[in-house]
Amino acid sequence: MQTIEIKGTVRTEVGKKSTKALRASGNVPCVIYGGENVIHFTAPEAEFRKIIYTPNVYIINVNIDGTVYPTILQDTQFHPVKEQMLHADFLQIKEDKPVVIEVPVKLEGFAEGVRAGGKLQLEKRKLRIKALPANLPDSLDINIDNLGLGKTIQIGHLSFDNIELLNAKNAVVVAVRLTRAARAAQQASE
């Protein structure tokens, strides 16, 4: 999995008044959970653009005053009207403890059903997985070459090494739907 670094500084005051002042100066109040202690820190809002506005998932090395913590982004809060980030929660990861995270799905190949006139629909763009940090993939690659017209791939049909899929087993990941043209061609051939 790709890594990225964010630089921050420790927060000494955690009240409402100091938080408002931080946000006004262009910083985001953040918290790191999962370690020995809960760490409150701030980071510039510009640092989060490369993490938030991308489909990729990263292991984030948070550098707080020289100390680096390997984390994943757990949750973010935004202003309801403005596009301003209000808060970020990070989960500190350890090599021997599994992590639950959503990873993007990447389709490989050209489906038979699409060649026959069907329409490919990706129902789940991200899947929730549980794995050790060393086994976390950048994306979940699914081969769709043998996916026929009107057929689907469900989560129960997928398996990956050292990764546990946490979504419902009967949830559809990708499907090839019948179009009107394909349905008419199918009826004409019958």
Image: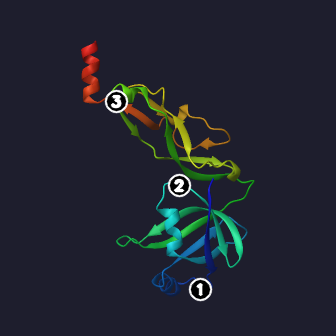
Could you tell me how far apart the alpha carbons at marks 3 and 1 are, in whole angstroms? 58 Å
Specify the quadrant of the image occupied by residue 74. bottom right
User: Residue 118: x percent and y percent?
Assistant: 34, 30
For badge 2, the amino acid type reads Asn
The three-letter code of the residue at mark 3 reads Gly
Comparing labels 3 and 1, the label whose residue is closer to the camera: 3
Single out the mark in the foreground, 2 or 1: 2
Horizontal relation, residue 178 to residue 112: left or right: left
- Is label 2 in a helix, a strand or a loop? loop
Residue 94 is situated, as x and y percent measured from the top left of the image, at 72, 59
Query: Relative to 99, does residue 186 appear above or below in the rendering?
Result: above
Please tell me which of labels 2 and 1 falls first in the chain: 1
- Going 25% across and 27% down the picture, which residue do you hit? 181
Q: Sequence-wise, which precedes: disc 3 or disc 2?
A: 2
Q: Which mark is residue 13?
A: 1
Q: Residue at x 24, y 15 (%)?
A: 188
Q: Could you say which disc has been placed on residue 56 in the image?
A: 2
Q: Which residue is mark 3?
A: 118
How crowded is the residue under tag 3: few (<14 C-alpha within 10 Å), some, or many (20+)?
many
Q: Compute the Cα span from label 3 to label 2.
A: 28 Å
Label 2, residues with CA under 10 Å away: few <14, some 14-19, many ≥20: some
